[in-house]
């Protein structure tokens, strides 16, 4: 039987279309539909229940060394903790250089870290870390189902949060991309840094998996229903929509963000768009640290290429469809094919509904996009066909997909930006 997050009852009461994902019954979309939810994140605000994600704590004098050994990023950048402290995205590899899982690591202090991994992966990643611990100096705890996690994504995210935080100016101060502040545990020394208006301690992270400006909120599970209800109420009149997994998948694909165990799979972590999460030295050559799996990926000279693509209309094919050249030659398989409903082609270039230079009255049809795994390098601009049964869809290999994403825009600019679909006045 599928598990439910602490917000499961709210989802059922509000007509969510459910689907089982990683052992959890999760909303696929709500009555507004996946297209409306996708566009809400690009033009206003969307809230996502991501409480199914697993969170580990790694603490003790050996914590840094263990994570530095197992995570691909050079975690030295998290030490000593800055104000606000940093977090970073990377992957855990096994000795073959294959992906165990992707993860965001939060540096609380030199001997305390949070590790956020995918739904159902808490026990596996905890066991992986324990197996590679050099000694007893690192304690690993799995907080699965003990936290509520809510993602608030979109250009209006800060404006929705402001009236709900006890001290928004302090919470948002210098909160750059992949910075965070606060803690969900009332006993943690950081707990007082960010509080909900009712005093609930919150870990507020300037991250998310849509490619757009926004936040991830971590709270004790029992507090999540109140936080969620407050957000939905505060978003009335500001275009806020609850969003399900379908919109999350189409948004992350358009942002060239991988789905672990689909785009990052059981193969060497090389020749893909995300090798930037490896500790590359100056000029992109060599690595600045040792890490588990390094030798294997350095030796993987005959590995396949994982490449992003964008189509010319919204049509899709399922994962596993074949990739063919213009002459029909088999090149590889489709890993992900979704439709980013906020983009379209205008005079040969891709334009987003959020692009500042979009034509007047721009109404995107959406474009299919995703990732293919092929046996030879294909430069951007190469046309290939995705084939499934009788369906054949022409697409183009690209280096990027949805333009004008807002994830990295300074928070000060986003606090004063007027949401495209709201009637509110700038702050």
Image: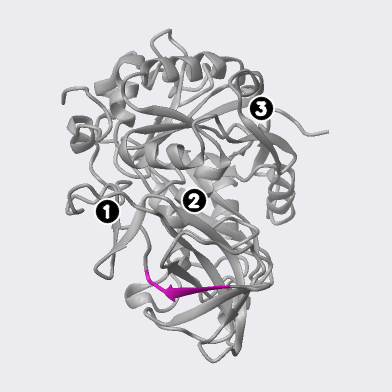
Residue 241 position (above or below residue 389): above
Could you classify mark 3 by the number of other residues whose Cα lies within 10 Å: few (under 14), some (14-19), or many (20 or more)?
A: many
Task: Please tell me which residue is depicted at 60% across the width and 26% down the height of the picture.
Answer: 147
Between 117 and 391, the residue placed more toward the observer is 391
Residue at the spot of label 3: 5
Badge 2 vs badge 3, beta-carbon distance below 8 Å: no
Of helix, strand and loop, which one carries label 2? helix
Residue 41: percent from left, percent from top:
38, 39
Badge 1 vs badge 3, beta-carbon distance below 8 Å: no
Task: Tell me: 293 left or right of 253.
Answer: right
- Distance (Cα) linking label 1 and label 3: 33 Å
Residue at the spot of label 2: 250
Return the disc, 2 or 1, that comes first in the chain's sequence.
Answer: 2
Task: Please tell me which residue is depicted at 33% across the width and 23% down the height of the picture.
Answer: 160
Q: Is residue 109 visible?
A: no
What segment is highlighted magenta in the picture?
Answer: 392-399
Could you classify mark 1 by the number of other residues whose Cα lies within 10 Å: few (under 14), some (14-19), or many (20 or more)?
A: some
Residue 268 location, quadrant: bottom right
Residue 153: percent from left, percent from top:
39, 36
Residue 207 position (above or below residue 183): below
Label 1 or label 3, whichever lies nearer to me, is: 1
Residue 181 location, quadrant: top left
Between 322 and 375, the residue placed more toward the observer is 322
Task: Please tell me which residue is depicted at 43% across the width and 37% down the height of the picture.
Answer: 36
- Distance (Cα) linking label 2 and label 1: 16 Å
Return the disc, 2 or 3, that comes first in the chain's sequence.
Answer: 3
Task: Tell me: 69 left or right of 155.
Answer: right
Residue at the spot of label 1: 404
């Amino acid at each position: 039987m599928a598990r439910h997050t602490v917000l499961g009852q709210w989802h059922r009461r509000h007509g969510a279309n459910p689907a089982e994902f990683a052992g959890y019954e999760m909303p696929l979309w709500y009555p507004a539909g996946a297209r409306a939810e996708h566009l809400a994140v690009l033009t206003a605000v969307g809230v996502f229940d991501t409480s199914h994600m697993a969170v580990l704590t790694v603490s003790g004098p050996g914590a840094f060394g263990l994570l530095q050994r197992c995570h691909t990023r050079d975690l030295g950048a998290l030490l000593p903790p800055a104000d606000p402290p940093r977090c970073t995205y990377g992957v855990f590899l096994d000795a073959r250089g294959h992906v165990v899982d992707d993860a965001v690591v939060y540096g609380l202090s030199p001997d305390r870290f949070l590790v956020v991994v995918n739904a159902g992966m808490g026990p596996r990643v905890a066991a992986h870390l324990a197996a590679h611990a050099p000694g007893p100096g690192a304690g690993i705890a799995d907080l699965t189902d003990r936290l509520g996690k809510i993602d608030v994504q979109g250009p209006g995210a800060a404006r929705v949060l402001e009236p709900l935080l006890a001290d928004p100016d302090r919470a948002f101060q210098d909160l750059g991309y992949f910075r965070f502040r606060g803690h969900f545990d009332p006993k943690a020394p950081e707990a007082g840094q960010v509080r909900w208006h009712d005093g609930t301690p919150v870990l507020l992270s300037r991250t998310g998996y849509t490619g757009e400006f926004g936040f991830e909120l971590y709270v004790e599970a029992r507090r999540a229903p109140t936080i969620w209800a407050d957000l939905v109420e505060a978003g009335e009149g500001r275009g806020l929509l609850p969003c399900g997994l379908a919109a999350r998948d189409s948004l992350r694909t358009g942002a060239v963000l991988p789905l672990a165990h689909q785009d990052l799979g059981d193969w060497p972590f090389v020749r893909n768009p995300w090798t930037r999460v490896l500790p590359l030295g100056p000029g992109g050559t060599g690595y600045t640290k040792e890490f588990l799996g390094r030798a294997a990926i350095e030796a993987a000279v005959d590995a396949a290429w994982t490449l992003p693509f964008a189509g010319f209309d919204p049509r899709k094919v399922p994962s596993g469809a074949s990739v063919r050249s213009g002459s029909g030659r088999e090149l590889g398989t489709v890993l992900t094919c979704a439709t980013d409903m906020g983009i379209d082609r205008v005079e040969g270039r891709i334009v987003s509904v959020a692009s500042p230079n979009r034509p007047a009255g721009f109404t995107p049809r959406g474009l299919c996009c995703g990732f293919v795994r092929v046996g030879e390098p294909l430069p951007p601009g190469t046309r290939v066909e995705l084939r499934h049964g009788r369906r054949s869809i022409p697409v183009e290999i690209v280096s990027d997909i949805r333009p004008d994403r807002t994830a990295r825009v300074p928070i000060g600019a986003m606090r004063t930006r007027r949401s495209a679909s709201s009637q509110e006045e700038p702050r």
